[in-house]
Amino acid sequence: MNFDPKDYEKHYSEQSFWEKLSKHAAKAGKKVVYTALLGYYALENPKVSAWAKARIYGALGYLAFPVDLVPDIIPAAGYTDDFAVLMFAIGQVALNIDKTVRLKAVQKLEDWFGNVSENDKDIIDVEAKVSEVEKATKEGQLIEEVEK
C-alpha cells in the first residue's frame, strides 16, 4: 500500500474526524478507533514535529475520506486499510505517545464502547504494535549514536 499523507491531509478536519468516529465507531472497532485517538491526542504534544504531525493529519484524513482502498462497508475487512495507515502514522510519533495521550484515548474510547479494561485484547494489540515501533526507534537511535 502506497500511502502519501499529502494526498489525504486536506480531507482532515476535526469535524470530519469526530463525525466519522461517532457514526462508525462500532463498525470500525476498538483497534481502529483507539489508534485514531492516539494519533489525534498525540497532535497536542508539542514534542511532535511538524513532519510527524503532517503524517498524522494525513492518516486521520484517510480515515475521514469517504473513498478508501478497501471500502469501509465491507464486513470485517473494511477498516483494515485505515488501521494500516493509522499505525504507519503512529509509528512516526511512537516515542511521544505518553500516559496522558493513552489516558485521553481510552477515556474517549469509553464514550463509544463503554468501560474499557487495560486487559482489553484490542488495546493490548495496539499497544504491542506501538511498543514494537518504539523499541525499533530507540534501537535505531542507539545505533546512530554508536556510529557517530
Image: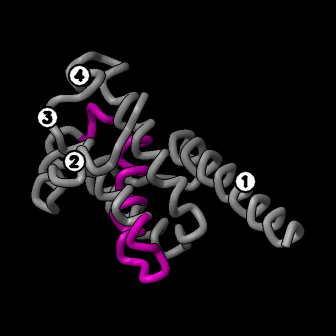
Q: Disc 3 to disc 4, how far (Cα)? A: 8 Å
Among numbered discs 1 and 4, the one appearing first in the sequence: 4
Query: In the rendered view of the protein, which quadrant contains the C terminus?
Result: bottom right
Label at residue 66: 3
Label at residue 136: 1
User: Magenta region: which residues?
Assistant: 25-51
Quadrant assignment, res 81: top left
Label at residue 71: 4
Tell me whether the residue at label 1 lies in contact with that at label 2, contact meaning CB atoms closer than 8 angstroms.
no
Q: Position of residue 25 (x, y in %)?
A: 26, 42
Q: Is residue 131 left or right of residue 97?
A: right
Q: Residues within 10 Å of mark 1 (few under 14, many from 20)?
A: few
- Tag 1, which secondary structure? helix
- Position of residue 99 relative to residue 125, above or below, is below
The residue drawn where x is 36% and y is 70% is: 43
Label at residue 21: 2
Among numbered discs 2 and 3, the one appearing first in the sequence: 2
- Position of residue 122 relative to residue 136, above or below, is above
Badge 2 amino acid: Leu
Q: Position of residue 91 (x, y in %)?
A: 54, 53
Among numbered discs 2 and 4, the one appearing first in the sequence: 2
* Of residues 14 and 104, the one drawn nearer to the viewer in this rendering: 14
Q: Disc 2 to disc 3, how far (Cα)? A: 13 Å
